[in-house]
Image: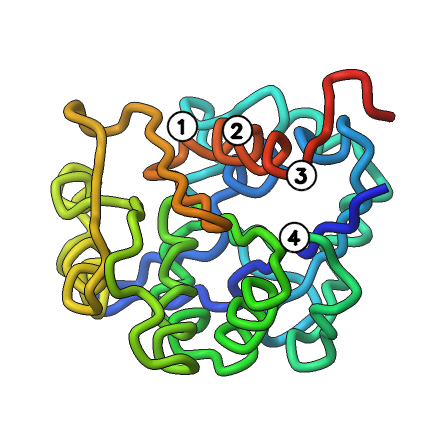
Amino acid sequence: MKKILMILTSHEGMEHTDSKTGVWLGEFTDPYYELLDHGCRITLASPAGGQPPIDPMSKLTEHITESNRRFQADVGLIADFAHTYKLASIDPAEFDAVFFPGGHGPLWDLASNPDAGRIIVEMMNAGKPVAAVCHGPAALISAAKAKLGFLEGKRVTGFTNTEEALVMRSGNIPYHLETRLKELGADFHSALIPMTPHVEIDGLLVTGQNPLSAGPTAKALIEMLGLGKDQS
């Protein structure tokens, strides 16, 4: 059984607005159940521990996914989500891979969290995969702080500047993820059409572009871990 660490944001505030952010629900639930259904054991962690905030927009009807509905009826997972482990207490040696869901929150906390950076660098140094989707790749910024040149030449994707403009939150974030990753030397790629699924793989690093890429990113990680469809 593969053990997966899933790291969620603890940040809900946005700049110049009373609107809140947090975990984008489908970017958590889609990968969670993909991994669970392939026999993985998943541990949830966040910088602050306890219950992460959920982006209210991700609860709107037009964003509800099948995995969201499954989550709403999953008493065990709801309890685990309410009691995530503090990131500082996590030993990456206990896990086979790490996954970072998005929501805008990671732009603030996971991008600057030294434990997130430590875990990413230690996992990859140990030959273990690191996956992130949408704004989850903001955690790679912390890895670039932990290891100079970490992102140089790495082929990645994430929520694009165009997509930020489309969701009309460009004025409420501290920086644009695409721009920052490029500034750190990343080889950034994206789908030709915004808001369509897109995944990039570079060695042990798997990144997905946007909410619709959450499931495909998890599937790429599952393949990297050598888990077949009949795992249970």
Residue 215's disc number: 2
SS state under label 1: helix
Q: Residue placed at 39% from the left, 64% from the top?
A: 140
**Spot occupied by residue 212 in the image (x, y as percentages of width and height):** 40, 28
Tag on residue 97?
Answer: 4
| Distance of label 2 from label 3 (alpha carbons) | 15 Å
Cα separation, mark 4 vs mark 1, equals 21 Å
Mark nearer the viewer, 1 or 3: 3
Of pointers 4 and 2, the one earlier in the residue sequence: 4
Disc with the residue nearer the chain's start (1 vs 3):
1
Question: Where, by quadrant of the figure, is residue 14 drawn?
Answer: bottom left
Tell me the distance, in whole angstroms, between the alpha carbons under discs 4 and 2: 16 Å
Mark number, residue 225: 3
Q: Residues within 10 Å of mark 1 (few under 14, many from 20)?
A: some
Estimate how packed mark 4 is, as few (under 14), some (14 to 19) or many (20 or more) residues with alpha carbons within 10 Å.
many
Question: Hey, what amino acid is under mark 2?
Answer: Gly
